[in-house]
Structures are given as structure tokens and as C-alpha cells.
Amino acid sequence: MRFNFRIIVSIIGLLLIINGLSMLLCLPFSVYFRERDWKALLIAGILTYIVGFISWYRYKDTNNKELKKRDGYLIVTLGWVTMSAFGALPYVFSGAIPSFTDAFFETVSGYSTTGASILTDIESVHKGILFWRSLTQWIGGMGIIVLTVAILPFLGIGGMQLFVAEAPGITPDKLKPRIQATAKRLWLVYVGITAIECVLLMFGGMTFYDALNHSFTTMATGGFSTKNTSAADFSPYIQYVITIFMFLAGTSFTLNYFAFKRKFKDIWRNEEFRYYLGGTIVSTIIVTIAVFVGTENSLEKSFRDSIFQIVSIVTTTGFVSADYTQWTPFVTLLLFIFMFIGGSAGSTAGGVKIVRHIILLKNSFLELKRQLHPSAVIPVRLNDKAISKNITFHVLAFIMIYISIFALGSILVSLSGLDFMTSIGAVATCLGNVGPGLGDVGPVDNFAGLPGVSKWILSFLMLLGRLELFTVLMLFTPYFWRKV
């Protein structure tokens, strides 16, 4: 099988066009706040747009418009890397992050909605650059590829390969028969919920600028904040609002779409959602009791900090309302385990995803039953439907590879001189796209002090986690490049 490199270059050029135009959207904030970063954003935006336009225009009239599945995976991975490389330019040109290694790390963290940062004084960064930082997460939340397929039907090629390769979760639910219609509805829900949160945050006293930034990074489950203390100094009202919308962002956007359509029975029938809601409630009760007993916090603050941090970590958003590493060791360990759970399939959350854990647990229990009845055919069931063995095997393989990459990544990062707690915390949070970790990259620290080689390894892990392992890993296999 030959790759259609003409289409690949053309579509990546299209992504760069969108990338460049997105940078220009930050200019009004630079002008309004009378800051000097407008030049960096303008130059970076125009340069990115020109490179993208040349790449797109050169091959836009290609005769062969058939997009293969391999092309789709290659476009997604190369597109993400290319956009991150060009997305780092505003940081470098403005001097906010002079090092390209650090700027690339920050940009990958944005597009992958990880939220790991190397900025030590966020509030000193110019407003236009900070808005670009938040915008990268909002764009990356649902996926720039889905955005392209949704708003550019004139592309003239099938978009399903791109959607399957990019959309979070095991398989994207097709709300409508055509892929463009599906992507449009997902983005309409995404934009709508973002707007609602922005209004509610402004009711709580936030400025429009801060409300918009935090709405972007909440719905993307990214966690970038315009404040050095993240959400710690916000009012209880604002923290509760962010908690609610983090939970919604970690819910499948198909279910959010059903909520808009008032199909609440369909939502409750979803087994993953019931586990998601039930697990959040039970965990909150346990952690609230532990924090209340182990600290001097009031019951309300213990509850608020507990539910905020649980939802933030499970949905891989990464906002911080308190230094959870100063709570009891039991809670710290529990929250570390939560980094491996992830939100719902079909949400903007990262991590393993709840549905995979459900299938793993069900298959494990059924395996015991199969030992007693070896001749019986006992399938794993989800939402009262039998799941094919292929899906079960895919889930088992995913989790095995995920754990293996976590172990290998921790070893590689530790070789750069980081201690054990920092190494496993950094790898877990970057691979799961969470944000804060443990040790020197905990909730009140950042990734600025890490060696350059560690930042490149973690950047790769963020990309790997965001694209759910297989999309990237298959590019490193010989049979992916083999002609068939």
C-alpha cells in the first residue's frame, strides 16, 4: 500500500492554516491590554498561515482523493507534531519561553490537554500569549482533526479515517450517519457548554478574560490557568462551577448531546456513566472523611477540596484547589491511582478510560466462571449487549501496553537524575494527560526544573496518551510502512 503523501501534505497544510488563524485570534487581547506580545503573535500567525497555505494549495487539486486508513493515522500523528512545533513559535518569538524545548513541551501539553507547565510565574506572561496557551487546549480538546472535518466539507475526501484516528475513546458514536454531521454536533455541544460555563463564571465575579480562559481549559480537561495558584484562590462558588463542568467534560459528549435533547433515560442506561457517577460519589465520601479527620479543614472545605481534586484528576483536567500531597498518605496514593482511570470514552478526558476498566474487570470475573464451566460461551456484556472478543482483546492489549509504557517511561526519566517519586509522578501524569503529578512535579510545583531530555520524553508520552497509544505506536512498526 502506498501512502498518498500529496493528500497528507495538503491536509497538514490545512491544519497549519487553522493554527495560524487561531494565533491571530489572540491579537485583540494583546491590543486591549496594551501589551507587546502582539508582534510575536502576528509574525507567528502569518508565518504559520503562509507555510500551511503553500502546503495546502500545492496539492489541493490532486487527482487521487482516496484517503486510506494508514493515511489517516499518519495525518493525525504528523499533524499533531507539526502543529505543536509551529504552536511553540509565539512563546519563542515573544520571549515568554525562549527555549524551544520548553516551548514545545508547553505546546504539546496544551494540544494534548495535559496541563503540565514549565512556566514559574504565569501571571507575568502577557495576556495574548496566555490566551493562546488556553486556546491550544480548547482546540486540542475535541481534536483539531474533527474540527477540520466538521467545518471544511469541501475537503472532498472521506473523513472517517481521520475521525476514528483522532476521536477519544474506543470508538466514536455516530450521532448522525455522515461523519461531518457527527463532528459538527460534537463541536456544537462543545461550544455550547463552554459558553454556559463562561457566563456562570462571570456571575461569580471573574473577568470575561479569566472566565473565557478557564472555560476553554475546563471543557478541554486541560487545566491551564491564568493564575499561579490555579483554582486555589477562587471563591467556593467558582470552584463548584468548575467542578461541575469538569465532570461534564469527562462525560461522553454523546451523552451531553442526549442531555440537550432531554434523553435522560438513554444517559442512565449507559453503564460507563453509572460507574463514573457512582465512583465519583463514593470516592468523594471516602476522601472527604480522610481529609476532614487528617487536617484542620472544615467539613465544607474538606468536601469541596476532595470533590474538586477527585473530579480534576479522574477527568485528567489537572486544576488544583489544594496541595493534595500534604493530605494523608492514603489520599495521596488514592489520587495517584486515579491518574490511571481517566474519564469516559468519547469525552475530552485522557487516561485509560472508565469503559476499559469495566471491560477488564468483567472479563477477569468471567474468567473465574469459565474455569468452572470451560465449555460454556460466556461473553462480556456492556449496556446489556455482548461485546465481541476482538474488543475485549483490544482492551486487554491497550492496558498491558499502557502499563508497560508507564514502567519503561519511568525508568528512562529516572536515568536523567530524577528521584523515584518524581519519575513515576511525571510519567503517570503526562501519559494520562493529567497535569500535576507527585514529587518535584506535584500540584504546587511544575516541570521547569526537569532536564531537557526528560521534557522530550514526556512530550512524546503526552502525545502518545492523547492519541491513545496505537495511533502513534503503529508508526514504529515495520508492517505499517510495508507495501501490501
Image (tube, rainbow, N blue to C red):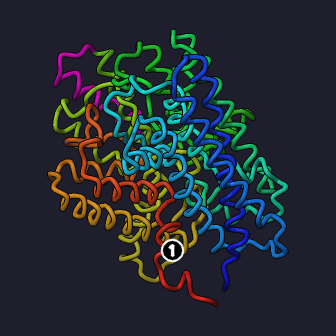
Identify residue type, mark 1.
Answer: Leu
Q: Secondary structure at mark 1?
A: helix
Q: Indicate whether 63 appears above or below 119.
A: below
Q: Position of residue 1 (x, y in %)?
A: 66, 85
**Residue closer to the observer: 189 or 110:** 110
Q: Indicate whether 52 appears above or below 23.
A: below
Q: Indicate whether 113 appears above or below 385.
A: above
Q: Position of residue 70 (x, y in %)?
A: 63, 74
Which residue corresponds to the image point at 55% horizontal and 28% vertical from the top-left? 215
Which residue corresponds to the image point at 58% horizontal and 42% vertical from the top-left? 44
Which residue corresponds to the image point at 66% horizontal and 78% vertical from the top-left? 3
Q: Position of residue 139 (x, y in %)?
A: 60, 42
Horizontally, residue 441 falls left or right of residue 373, namely left
Residue ID for mark 1: 475
User: Is residue 294 highlighted in magenta?
Assistant: yes
Residue 349 seen by the camera: no
Residue interval drawn in magenta: 279-298
The kind of secondary structure the magenta stretch mainly shows is helix
Residue 43 seen by the camera: yes
Horizontally, residue 203 falls left or right of residue 319, namely right
Which residue corresponds to the image point at 37% horizontal and 42% vertical from the top-left? 116
**Residue closer to the observer: 419 or 299:** 419
Q: Quadrant of residue 295?
A: top left
Horizontally, residue 167 falls left or right of residue 377, namely right
Q: Quadrant of residue 61?
A: bottom right
Q: Position of residue 106 (x, y in %)?
A: 42, 44
